[in-house]
Image (spheres, coloured by chain):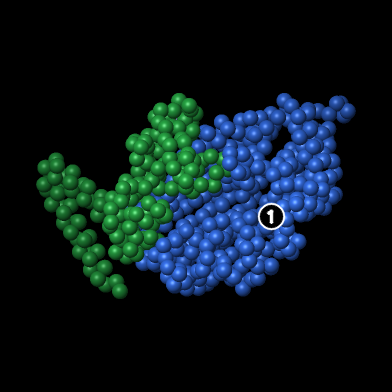
Amino acid sequence: MDCDICGKKAKVHLTQLVGGQIKKIALCDDCAKEKGVTDPTGFALAEMLLGKTPGKVVAPVPPVVQGFGRRCPECGFTLDDLRRIRRFGCAGCYTTFKEEVNQMLRGMHKGSKHCGKVPAGLMELHERTQRLEELRGRLDQAITSENYEEAAGLRDEIRQIEIKTSTRSTERP
Amino acid sequence: MMRFTTLIKNPADWMTGEGADNAVVLTSRIRLARNLRGEPFPGWAKKEQRRQTLEILRPAVENLPCMKDAFSQELDDLSSVQKQVLVERHLISREHAARGEGSAAVIERRQSIALMLNEEDHLRMQAIRPGMSLRAAYESLAAVDEELEQSLELAFDHDLGYLTTCPTNLGTGLRASSMLHLPALVLSDQIGQVLQAVNKIGLAVRGLYGEGTESLGNLFQISNQSTLGESEETILRRLERVIAQVATHERNARDKLLEDDPEMVSDKIGRAYGVLRHAWIIDSKEALNHLSLLRLGGDLGFLPQETVKSCDALLMDIQPAHLQLHSGRKLTPEERDQIRAEIVRSRLQTLEAPDIRSTRKKNGNDPDPEIL
Ligand SMILES: [Zn+2]
Ligand SMILES: [Zn+2]
């Protein structure tokens, strides 16, 4: 059987129950890797891949992960609900189920970090968050390479930004 | 506010407008998904919560400058045929039409910007333009987005971007797509190869009115799949590049068909003309496929250039809900096939039969022997 995406020889075969229907999908090694199918038994990527079939109007569906009884404090959503409706309950769910989301995102998109447009009102905060992240990365590096002078400087800079951020957030209503 | 009949009486701007590269790329569409912070997503919200969200969203949307004198309606207040007409015009989605209380549509009067309230996400905004104009469509919608950000608190995360109900839309929330007419690639059996290549780059392709794997009317939609990890600019640029390449392939295939097998092309177009001009019963599949060939004939010069536009208008007007709206009553499938044939015949009444010899002259492929 040939790969459903590129037509090369398929190595990975997925059989998935999607909406009560059995769907089969064949992938070559490269495409499997590209789509993040590292564990062919544990992923429900069929619909995501089948989205490409001409005429199929199937929205890509996130693979569903193993769930426990955890509940989103904002909307009461659980991972069992995710398995059932395959959509989240509220924006807060992304914080509640952060790890599961990260697992799901693997292979779904070109990357895992937003690099697009930011709402105008959040731009300053966003830039500061980005800057903090960059500084923390450099700090780690400085410590590993035992460059303590640079580390001290970086730590000061980080602290300053953190103070600014926390006074800002208490100012907000 | 505009009434439904007024909105629908005229074809949308993008249906009749002339865009760049209209012969191959029919339309360009941009969709942005946005949600409010602190409100449950529409599919999970209880009825009262959906109402509450709508009460926040609706005034913000109706106050947009571009929505002056717009059409704004709760879906519950529309008949099922009216909703279906909006679906056929790509102004709301099938999912949106199926949603009950607390969902609304706000549509700009020329139908080039349409906003769905409480669809899968709180807000799904869409801009459509004729031809190859993803950029212009995006810019018009980004302006709307920026305006809304002033009055709405949107759900946004510094790592995941705009938070959407389904993680497949995270990040930019941007879905960009173009509808392409690719008859020559289909006729010359190159379509599979081209679509596979497009898919390989991570773009989604689907046949437009098709069921299963077939595509009707040789219409295909190409769109981005990934929304996270790339900027809007990167997504648009890749899509533009790929669409331009596919369009070039299609144009080359058209030239090559004319050169290699003009008899086959003439026969196909001639037959399509014959059926559409003289049929009394025609189902939508047959109509779409023949209209596609007539459209090709218009582009190749077998028929007047305006044929392309007439075909585009017909593609929309022969769909089931449009037919019911046109005749003002519910129709059986048999009646629909008759009325469809009637509309097609009357629209093409003055269209003269395709002329093969004049074509070749116009295209400059071969010198006309009679002139030499
Ligand atoms: Zn492959
Ligand atoms: Zn939640």
In the displayed structure, does residue B315 sit left or right of residue B353?
left
The colour applied to the residues of chain B in this rendering is blue
Above or below B44: residue B28? above
Q: Residue at x 52, y 65 (%)?
A: B100
- Of B275 and B194, nearer the camera is B275
Chain drawn in green: A
In the displayed structure, does residue B95 sit left or right of residue B188?
left
Which corner quadrant holds the N terminus of chain B? bottom right
Q: Residue at x 34, y 36 (%)?
A: A38
Q: Is residue A136 visible?
A: yes
Q: Amino acid at mark 1?
A: Pro
Q: Which residue is mark 1?
A: B320
Q: Residue at x 85, y 26 (%)?
A: B369
Q: Quadrant of residue A142?
A: top left
- Where residue B94 sits in the image (x, y, percent)? 56, 56
Q: Quadrant of residue B192?
A: top right
